[in-house]
Image (cartoon, grey):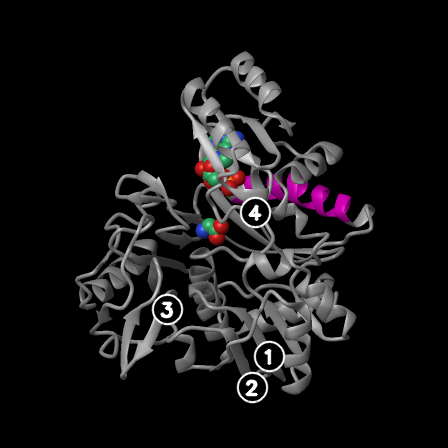
Amino acid sequence: MNILILGGGGREHALAWAIKQNPKCDRLIVAPGNAGIAQLAEVADIDILSGATVVTFCEENAIDFVVIGPEAPLAAGVADALEAAGILVFGPSAAAARLEASKAFTKEICDACGAPTAAWARFADPTPAKDYIRRMGAPIVVKADGLAAGKGVVVAMTVAEALAAIDDMFGGSLGAAGAEVVIEEFMTGEEASYFVLCDGIDVLPIGTAQDHKRVGEGDIGPNTGGMGAYSPAPVLTEAIAAQALDEIIRPCLAEMARRGTPYRGVIFAGLMIDHGRARLVEYNCRFGDPETQVLMLRLGAQVLDLLLATAEGRLAGAGVNWADDHALTVVMAARGYPGAYAKGSVIRGLDALPQNAREMVFHAGTAARDGAIIANGGRVLNVSARGATLAEAHARAYAMLDAIDWPEGFFRRDIGWRAL
Ligand code: AMP
Ligand code: GLY
């Protein structure tokens, strides 16, 4: 079959790498892709936020199946446009993707089905929001309701910080995303991510992972899109994963179906684990980045069958073949990230690295220039490895990192510390 993947980050490189290994995949196109993806698939530069453009491209290229990577095309209704055109798609409708696109909506769904999450309130005006913060005290969490590319959450340790966040968000710093805010109870515990496929009715868990959001070693400094990840996440034990599935994920997805907006795709639950129980932090309606890089290394070619079963409503009979293994990925970013950084520096040493089922360098923000790979974004490479133990995966990944010659880049030395 002919397959189109939308997106151009490390997540999409990992998806393309796994899907390409499945014999069902005849032709693979990724839009817009990146320099690493171009080494294994065709790339196409189209406007992936336009449903009409994507549908026309699929018709012209006889595409049988579309996999949507990032949240923006989902929120823009690209899955709806494809479905209306009769093209099989992996990724939820815009209505179902509100589970990521609106924090207040997610909280309403949790309340409607009794899913455990932080206590919350929503505000469309700054004055009552500030009164609420003064009443509740700190620490407290202030969130822009809409999609804000990871910048919409302020975990305020003082009341003054929370009040400043209110001024900031209602002052328009995040545009329309901050027109409404959600204020939440601060939850303590350890975070982990749970990835579950849903075909509208049935669910199938496909793995756990832990991200490292802060830029600095020891989890300090500003938040990023993620500086590294590993899978599985030992903190999400079988018992806690079962509780999260039974008390949070299944009830929320059932509530979505009950409302006439069934969820089809991967639900990525961010969980806070404390005293042996999980509470929901947030949902994402897509695969995580860089969590997908470790999931794909562990799942391999079967991923295409799982995504097809999800899109075709066949999850009831589906299962995952698990190798009892571990994977770890380390993000190499451009110096300055998540602040200002330069593009265009040359990355050397990639050609000499092993690229196989155990060791892969997935590209995020890269481009090709005169036969060289150059940095073209903040997060640039995802150096990833698999092993019988997490320590083995860790050693393999860091050995590869030490062989990459890119003075303008940096990475954290401590990815996996919680589990190691
Ligand atoms: P979100 O975009 O909702 O995942 O928030 C980003 C990060 O903020 C999360 O990964 C948590 O580390 C933190 N966070 C969000 N909500 C809470 C909360 N209610 N309590 C504590 N930390 C939170
Ligand atoms: N790594 C976090 C995310 O994909 O949202």
Q: Earlier in the sequence, mark 1 or mark 3?
A: 1
Find the distance from the CA under tag 2 to the CA under tag 3: 20 Å
Residue named by callout 3: 363
Magenta region, mostly helix, strand or loop?
helix
- Secondary structure beneath dot 3 equals strand
The quarter holding residue 302 reads bottom right
Q: Which of marks 2 and 3 is nearer the N terminus?
A: 2
Image vertical order of residue 241 relative to residue 52, above or below: above
Element class at badge 1: strand
Q: Where does label 1 land, which residue? A: 3
Q: Is mark 2 in CB contact (under 8 Å) with mark 1?
A: yes
Check disc 4 and report the residue beneath it: 147
Q: How crowded is mark 4: few (under 14 residues within 10 Å), some or many (20 or more)?
A: many
Q: Residue 27: give its label.
A: 2
Nearer the viewer's eye, disc 4 or disc 3?
Answer: 4
What residue is rendered at 71% in x and 38% in y?
Answer: 109
The residue under label 2 is which amino acid type?
Answer: Arg
- Marks 2/1: CA–CA distance: 6 Å
- The correct choice, above or below, for 353 with respect to 316 in the image is below
Callout 2: SS? strand
Q: Looking at the image, which residue is at 39% across and 53% down? A: 230
Say left or right for 256 vs 226: right
